[in-house]
Image (spheres, rainbow, N blue to C red):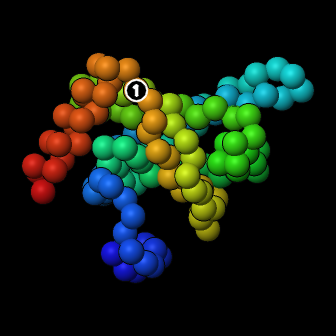
Protein backbone atom coordinates (compact mmCIF):
# COMPACT_ATOMS: atom_id res chain seq x y z
CA UNK A 1 0.00 0.00 0.00
CA UNK A 2 1.55 3.31 -0.98
CA UNK A 3 0.68 6.92 -0.16
CA UNK A 4 -2.24 6.10 2.12
CA UNK A 5 -2.57 8.97 4.61
CA UNK A 6 1.14 9.70 4.25
CA UNK A 7 2.24 6.08 4.64
CA UNK A 8 4.78 4.84 2.13
CA UNK A 9 6.09 1.35 1.76
CA UNK A 10 4.88 -2.20 1.96
CA UNK A 11 1.76 -2.75 4.07
CA UNK A 12 2.68 -4.70 7.21
CA UNK A 13 -0.71 -4.99 8.88
CA UNK A 14 -2.19 -8.44 9.30
CA UNK A 15 -5.80 -7.21 9.26
CA UNK A 16 -7.35 -4.69 6.87
CA UNK A 17 -8.43 -1.28 8.19
CA UNK A 18 -11.92 0.10 7.74
CA UNK A 19 -12.57 3.82 7.82
CA UNK A 20 -15.38 4.41 10.29
CA UNK A 21 -16.02 7.18 12.77
CA UNK A 22 -17.63 6.12 16.03
CA UNK A 23 -17.29 7.45 19.59
CA UNK A 24 -14.38 6.11 21.59
CA UNK A 25 -12.61 6.84 24.85
CA UNK A 26 -8.94 6.60 25.67
CA UNK A 27 -8.00 5.93 29.29
CA UNK A 28 -4.42 6.52 30.41
CA UNK A 29 -3.32 5.38 33.86
CA UNK A 30 -0.36 7.57 34.77
CA UNK A 31 1.82 7.53 37.90
CA UNK A 32 2.29 11.11 39.15
CA UNK A 33 4.37 11.75 42.22
CA UNK A 34 3.82 8.17 43.35
CA UNK A 35 0.03 8.31 42.90
CA UNK A 36 -1.93 6.81 40.03
CA UNK A 37 -3.87 9.36 37.97
CA UNK A 38 -6.45 8.37 35.38
CA UNK A 39 -6.85 10.55 32.29
CA UNK A 40 -10.12 9.80 30.45
CA UNK A 41 -10.31 11.34 27.01
CA UNK A 42 -13.26 11.57 24.66
CA UNK A 43 -12.44 10.87 21.06
CA UNK A 44 -13.50 9.02 17.97
CA UNK A 45 -12.17 6.31 15.74
CA UNK A 46 -10.71 7.17 12.37
CA UNK A 47 -10.30 3.58 11.33
CA UNK A 48 -10.55 0.15 12.92
CA UNK A 49 -9.44 -3.44 12.39
CA UNK A 50 -9.77 -6.68 14.34
CA UNK A 51 -6.57 -5.92 16.25
CA UNK A 52 -6.27 -2.14 16.30
CA UNK A 53 -7.79 1.31 16.14
CA UNK A 54 -6.73 4.76 15.12
CA UNK A 55 -8.21 7.32 17.50
CA UNK A 56 -8.43 11.09 17.27
CA UNK A 57 -8.40 12.90 20.65
CA UNK A 58 -7.66 16.38 22.00
CA UNK A 59 -3.95 17.13 22.19
CA UNK A 60 -3.14 19.07 25.35
CA UNK A 61 0.55 18.99 26.39
CA UNK A 62 -0.05 16.69 29.40
CA UNK A 63 -1.94 14.23 27.20
CA UNK A 64 0.71 14.19 24.48
CA UNK A 65 3.40 13.62 27.12
CA UNK A 66 1.43 10.72 28.64
CA UNK A 67 0.84 9.15 25.20
CA UNK A 68 4.55 9.41 24.45
CA UNK A 69 5.34 7.75 27.80
CA UNK A 70 2.88 4.95 26.96
CA UNK A 71 4.49 4.42 23.55
CA UNK A 72 7.95 4.26 25.08
CA UNK A 73 6.85 1.88 27.87
CA UNK A 74 7.39 4.40 30.66
CA UNK A 75 4.72 3.33 33.15
CA UNK A 76 1.49 4.41 31.45
CA UNK A 77 -1.26 1.81 31.02
CA UNK A 78 -3.65 2.25 28.09
CA UNK A 79 -7.33 1.35 27.99
CA UNK A 80 -9.82 1.90 25.18
CA UNK A 81 -13.61 1.92 25.10
CA UNK A 82 -15.29 1.82 21.70
CA UNK A 83 -19.01 2.48 21.38
CA UNK A 84 -20.68 -0.12 19.15
CA UNK A 85 -24.40 -0.60 18.54
CA UNK A 86 -24.53 -3.42 21.09
CA UNK A 87 -22.21 -2.32 23.85
CA UNK A 88 -19.16 -0.31 24.81
CA UNK A 89 -16.30 -2.66 24.07
CA UNK A 90 -13.42 -2.38 26.53
CA UNK A 91 -9.83 -3.32 25.75
CA UNK A 92 -6.30 -2.77 26.92
CA UNK A 93 -3.77 -1.79 24.33
CA UNK A 94 -0.35 -0.57 23.36
CA UNK A 95 0.33 2.78 21.72
CA UNK A 96 2.17 1.92 18.50
CA UNK A 97 2.45 5.47 17.16
CA UNK A 98 0.99 8.94 17.55
CA UNK A 99 1.02 12.17 15.62
CA UNK A 100 -0.06 15.65 16.62
CA UNK A 101 -2.43 17.26 14.14
CA UNK A 102 -2.67 20.95 13.21
CA UNK A 103 -6.11 21.16 14.82
CA UNK A 104 -4.63 20.57 18.32
CA UNK A 105 -5.70 16.96 18.16
CA UNK A 106 -3.64 13.80 18.38
CA UNK A 107 -4.01 10.74 16.16
CA UNK A 108 -3.08 7.60 18.11
CA UNK A 109 -2.55 4.11 16.71
CA UNK A 110 -3.41 1.48 19.30
CA UNK A 111 -2.89 -2.26 19.12
CA UNK A 112 -5.75 -3.95 20.99
CA UNK A 113 -3.92 -6.61 22.95
CA UNK A 114 -6.50 -7.69 25.48
CA UNK A 115 -10.30 -7.96 25.73
CA UNK A 116 -12.69 -9.99 27.78
CA UNK A 117 -14.32 -12.92 25.98
CA UNK A 118 -17.70 -11.17 25.59
CA UNK A 119 -16.09 -7.92 24.38
CA UNK A 120 -13.90 -9.85 21.91
CA UNK A 121 -16.98 -11.56 20.42
CA UNK A 122 -18.88 -8.29 20.09
CA UNK A 123 -15.85 -6.56 18.55
CA UNK A 124 -15.28 -9.35 16.01
CA UNK A 125 -18.97 -9.33 15.04
CA UNK A 126 -18.90 -5.54 14.71
CA UNK A 127 -15.82 -5.51 12.46
CA UNK A 128 -17.21 -8.37 10.36
CA UNK A 129 -20.50 -6.47 9.91
CA UNK A 130 -18.54 -3.50 8.55
CA UNK A 131 -16.68 -5.81 6.18
CA UNK A 132 -19.94 -7.22 4.86
CA UNK A 133 -21.40 -3.72 4.49
CA UNK A 134 -18.68 -2.66 2.03
Q: Nearer the viewer, residue 36 or 75?
A: 75
Task: Give the side of residue 95 with respect to residue 123, left or right.
Answer: right
Tally of numbered discs: 1
Task: Residue at 17% x, 42% y: name it.
Answer: 128
- Whether residue 66 is visible to the viewer of this picture, yes or no, is no
Farthest right residue?
33
Locate residue 85, reporting x and y percent. 24, 31
Q: Which image quarter is the N terminus in? A: bottom left
Q: Quadrant of residue 113?
A: top left
Task: Give the side of residue 88 with respect to residue 67, left or right.
Answer: left
Task: Residue at 24% x, 35% y: name it.
Answer: 124
Q: Residues within 10 Å of mark 1 (few under 14, many from 20)?
A: some
Task: Residue at 69% x, 42% y: name it.
Answer: 73
- Whether residue 17 is visible to the viewer of this picture, yes or no, is yes
Task: Give the side of residue 64 with respect to residue 127, left or right.
Answer: right
Q: Which image quarter is the C terminus in? A: bottom left
Question: In the rendered image of this protein, does residue 78 appear above or below residue 60?
Answer: above
Locate residue 51, reporting x and y percent. 37, 44
Question: In the rendered image of this protein, does residue 58 appear above or below residue 26?
Answer: below
Locate residue 68, reporting x and y percent. 70, 50
Question: In the rendered image of this protein, does residue 72 appear above or below residue 78?
Answer: below
Task: Residue at 23% x, 42% y: name it.
Answer: 127
**Which residue is label 1 attached to?**
115
Farthest left residue?
132
Per the image, label 1 sits on a secondary structure element best described as: strand
Question: In the rendered image of this protein, does residue 1 appear above or below residue 122?
Answer: below
Locate residue 55, reporting x and y percent. 48, 49
Amino acid sequence: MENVKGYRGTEKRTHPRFHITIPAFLRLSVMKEGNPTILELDGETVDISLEGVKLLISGEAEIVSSIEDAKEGRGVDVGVEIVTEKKRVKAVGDVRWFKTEESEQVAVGIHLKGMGREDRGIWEDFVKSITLGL
